[in-house]
Image: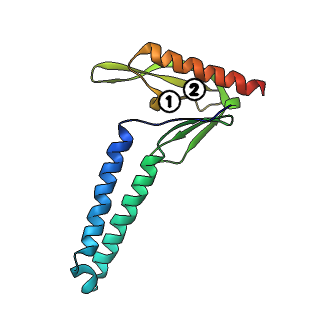
Amino acid sequence: MSRIVVRPRIQIPILVVIFTAWTLVGVTYLTSGDVVAERDWFGIVLGCVLVTSGVAGIWRAGRLGVVIDAEGVRLRGFDSRDQVTPWSAIQAVDCVQIDVRGGLPLYAPVLRLSDEAGSTPLSALGSYLRQDADRKVEQLRSFKAGAAQS
């Protein structure tokens, strides 16, 4: 099974722009001359924290998405660790309306797990069209069937 990575198209560029600006604020703060020349330790630490957190935010934003491979389904969130769901733990894949945005229903695949964890919606694979979400559900079901055979 080949590895498939699905990334949010709007969220990543917005986060990259925000964290780039955050990093530039830190760099500008450090290069103004007064902070380093006067050995203002609070200012130096603040500038380093701004730069470091900005670079870390850009890196995390670039990793957002869903990875589907032979191991299972991996959810890469911005503020949490990767959540890996192996194919053996997935009982079923269903198409469900998970949200309403701008008055339009958002449909996405939902992984029904075999343990007490319940279900995991894959909002990164969501769509406002039910047919598009159903197509993605069928692809996930075929990946699960392929993983069960091997």
Local crowd at mark 1 within 10 Å, few (<14), some, or many (≥20)? some
Mark 2: which secondary structure?
strand
Residue 122 screen position, x and y as percent: 50, 30
Position of residue 71 in the picture relative to residue 18 (left or right): right
Residue 14 seen from this side: yes
Residue 49 screen position, x and y as percent: 36, 67
Number of marks in the rendered image = 2
Label 2 sits on what residue type? Answer: Leu
Vertical relation: 7 (above or below) 37 = above
Quarter occupied by residue 142: top right
Vertical relation: 148 (above or below) 42 = above
Q: Which of 24 and 75 is in front in this view?
A: 24
Local crowd at mark 2 within 10 Å, few (<14), some, or many (≥20)? many
Quarter occupied by residue 149: top right
Furthest-top residue in this view:
131
Vertical relation: 52 (above or below) 45 = above
Mark 1: which secondary structure?
loop
Rendered residue at 25%/68% (across/down)? 28
Residue at mark 1 to residue at mark 2: CA–CA distance: 8 Å
Position of the N terminus, as image quadrant, is top right
Residue annotated with mark 1: 122
Residue annotated with mark 2: 111
Furthest-bottom residue in this view:
38
Rendered residue at 62%/20% (across/down)? 141
Q: Are marks 1 and 2 in contact (CB under 8 Å)?
A: yes
Position of residue 70 in the picture relative to residue 28 (left or right): right
Residue 24 screen position, x and y as percent: 29, 62
